[in-house]
Image (cartoon, grey):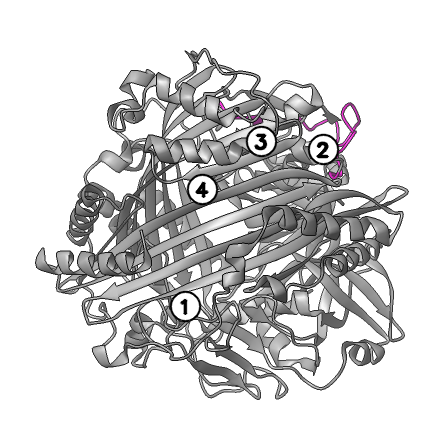
Amino acid sequence: MNGIHLLELANDVVRKAVSAGASDAECTIGEGDEFSAEVRMREIESLKEAGSRGMGLRILVGQRTGSSYTSDLSGEGIERLVRSAFEIAEITTEDPFAGLPDAGELGSVEGDLKLYSTAIENLDPAHNIELAKQAEAAAFAADPRISNSDGASFDSGTSRHIFANSRGFSGEYRTSSCSLSASPVARDGDSMERDYWFSMARDPGGLQPAAEIGRIAAQRALRRLHPVKVDTQKVPVVFEPRTARSLLDSIFDAVHGMSIYRQESFLAGKLGERVAGENVTVIDDATLPGLFGTSPFDDEGVPSRRTPVIERGVLKSYLLNTYAARKLGMKTTGNASRGLAGNAGIGHGNFFLEAGVQTPDRIVAGISNGFFVTGLMGFGVNIVTGDYSRGATGMWIRNGELAFAVSEVTIAGNLRDMLLSVEAVGSDLEFSGAMAAPTLKIGEMTVGGK
Amino acid sequence: MRFADSIFAGRFGITARDLNRYLAEALSQGGDFADLYFEYLLTSSIGIDESIVKSASQGVSMGVGVRVIAGERTGYAYCDDLSPEKVLKAANVAAHIASGPSKIDKFNLNEGLRHNLYPVVTAPTETALSARVDLVKRADRAARAYDPRVFQVQAGYADNLRHVLVATSDGVLTMDCQPLARLSVTALARRDGETPQQGHSGGGGRVDLDFFLKDKPPEYFAREAAREAIAMLDAAEAPAGEMTVVLGPGWPGILLHEAVGHGLEADFNRKGVSAFSGRIGQKVASELCTVIDDGTILNRRGSLNVDDEGHPTQRNVLIENGVLRGYLQDKLSSTLMGAASTGSGRRESYAHIPMPRMTNTFMLAGQSDPDEIVRSVPKGLYCANFGGGQVDITNGNFVFSASESYLIEDGKITRPVRNATLIGNGPEALKYVSMVGHDLKLDEGVGTCGKAGQSVPVGLGIPTVKIDRMTVGGTA
């Protein structure tokens, strides 16, 4: 099916739903294809290639909502989809806040957001396999202790997002992506450690060179060898960008509009208050060209935008879809996000903490006894209370230098205090996904060990 | 169920001749083995929030995955269209993992006998929506009625019915129809202007709706969620460092899933990247520990009549009296390791390549009285409930996060403490198990396990156990 056809089909489904008695309707179609090549120990391990698509419908009958989805886009499949949504609308409750965005709020960002690269269509599978082999080979070449591998892979895909609603919105965009990763295993005596490195881009030309990915992955695995479990103590903790990003995840969860109106976030009701150090500015921006959090419109057809969330430590905005905005008496921030089934949830664009001025080396140099976190494990973050307790691996900082590997320890604190005690923000902000943070130093956390 | 009675033969008109043709195409380039996984999935979900049923949806998805194995290589392609030309095209794409003349082109597809572990008369998915929406409304009312300090309740009900057909070039032809349902409740409680606390509960399995109407009604889960939220209102700071930990029965079995289960999946061991690689026959736990993975328990969330490669599930002994006995095997790893499949090949959907996974993982009951176990601890932590966990299979480190835990002081359970993560090392942690209770309990049926981007439903279980040394990640 070609592009114009699917957009027409979405509009057609919206019309069908309205003529069957829906007061409003919105239809999403997603279509994508994927290619994946995995190599291990210099040989091809698996090749995968496929495409799929699906359609979701959400209707309002008065203030009641119904939702359905299908992968069967035949006439019969669509009849069933519409019928299904009406069946569901019979069992939901009238909700005065339910509804689509106002017509005036709908729209799309103009201009080329560089989300799709035609180069992805011309990728040669043999070349992709070769890239993965090169990444793994570079890891092996880095050090004789890299003697095993959990593989390397090249993945690419394209997708189309189509959305139409009964308030007059109708739009679509395409995205492309590719990624290259390596996961070597380092072994020395009875110590065995694995780590990984990857690069991801919209255009194949934007990927980090395979040799560099393999080398960095090898270095990361090697520096984990022979780890020590340190004594339980309170020390400054430095998160490198890869782990600092997970703190952004928690901040996102805490400014998520649904959690705000339910009061299940430690940041609920804190708008205008100081919630972080003055050196902390957090932005959500879905309009930055070429990045993974970018889109012309959100999943309710509202244009993407830039929203300062925390500015110099002060909480400026939550992230909202239409529903959460109405519950809170606010306006949507264009952060609606949905799959094919159910109501729109809330997502983020490019959600990042602005870079500071200190290099990561300088930050570490200023610490006499502390923990440099390179890996985090588990789900021990409670957004309701802010309680934070996770498994961690990394390097111990002794007299301003990364001295030895540490593992099988926990780091704990409360996000409320952690954000207020950000003592340093690194200059090393880089986007490798939709969420990014530079190196961050937290004044003090409890390291749980021996 | 016979092939002729399956939805694939009935509604989609797929014949045994079609299956043969697809398999022949899949092996046309000289592959050693091929299988077809047809899936037709019906799902529904209902959510209540602020006592309003705000969201509900139902849907259908279908597709077929074609896999070809050539030596250690796997070729995979899938499509969401069951028409012969599309399936043949997918088979052709997967076939090209091999390059050579076709070795086999006739397949004697035989329908094997298998158990029926979920003899559900009517799957929840096929019952009236009005009966299912009542479950979340009842849960909402019961959680709010439990205590006036409960101010926010969310309940969600979700079910699905998965029709599958697996046909392999080894001649296996098997059909299954897998129901699954789950009810979950989250309650928030608050005292005056203080920080709220959350409680969770939920359960289900491969059951019919009667399970929620008779055995475990919504009120049961609702009260449990509310109770946990209220209990946590008094939580003090959790301790930090190494101490004695007592795990309560049931869901705390997540310890086994993370500490040993993943590390015993055969793919990691075949590649030598697991902390348990090459350790069969070695002592990896105290003699009190016998750990089982059993996909054959009636109506359990992690149970399957056949795994996603068409192999019957079975009861697998992983650790016997502290000694490592076996790995969890799928088709590929068992072939390459010269072992038998343990019925552990699972996949999230037709779009995913199968791999070795757990089903229901638990520790057998011991001799100790649970109260006596607590009484034996002068100072430590009692963990009644957990959230999720994670493991690094290469170095063996694992974590799991306590969501309801209490201090043990002088042999008595005293104050509740805040959420804390526990961390340990797989091949070492169970060596410190010094007492095992006689109260083995399986979890309520809420678990979902993630591996390499694929989620599958699993079960857990453990009796009360005492672990003499484990690191607790609190702040005090």
Q: Chain of mark 3?
A: B
Q: Nearer the viewer, mark 3 or mark 2?
A: 2
Q: Percent position (x, y) of residue A210? A: 72, 57
| Residue annotated with mark 2 | B269
Q: Secondary structure at mark 2?
A: helix
Q: Is the same chain shared between marks 1 and 4?
A: no
Above or below — where is B33 with respect to A358?
A: above
Q: Chain of mark 2?
A: B
Asked whether the beta carbons under mark 1 and mark 4 sit within 8 Å of each other, the answer is no
Q: Is the same chain shared between marks 3 and 2?
A: yes
Task: Inspect the magenta stretch and tell me whether residue B287 lies in it.
Answer: yes
Q: Residues within 10 Å of mark 3 (few under 14, many from 20)?
A: many
Above or below — where is B277 with respect to A386?
A: above
| Residue annotated with mark 3 | B362
Which image quarter holds the C terminus of chain B?
bottom right
Asked whether the beta carbons under mark 1 and mark 2 sit within 8 Å of each other, the answer is no
| Distance between the alpha carbons at the discs numbered 1 and 2 | 42 Å
Above or below — where is B345 with respect to B457?
A: above
Residue at horizontal 33 percent and vertical 77 percent from the top? A332
Q: Secondary structure at mark 1?
A: helix
B225 and A17: which is toward the camera: A17
Q: Is the same chain shared between marks 2 and 4?
A: yes
| Residue annotated with mark 4 | B446
Question: What's the residue type where badge 2 is placed?
Answer: Asn
Q: Which residues are magenta?
A: B273-296
Q: Chain of mark 4?
A: B
Question: Which mark is first along the chain, 4 or 3?
Answer: 3
Question: Which mark is first along the chain, 4 or 2?
Answer: 2
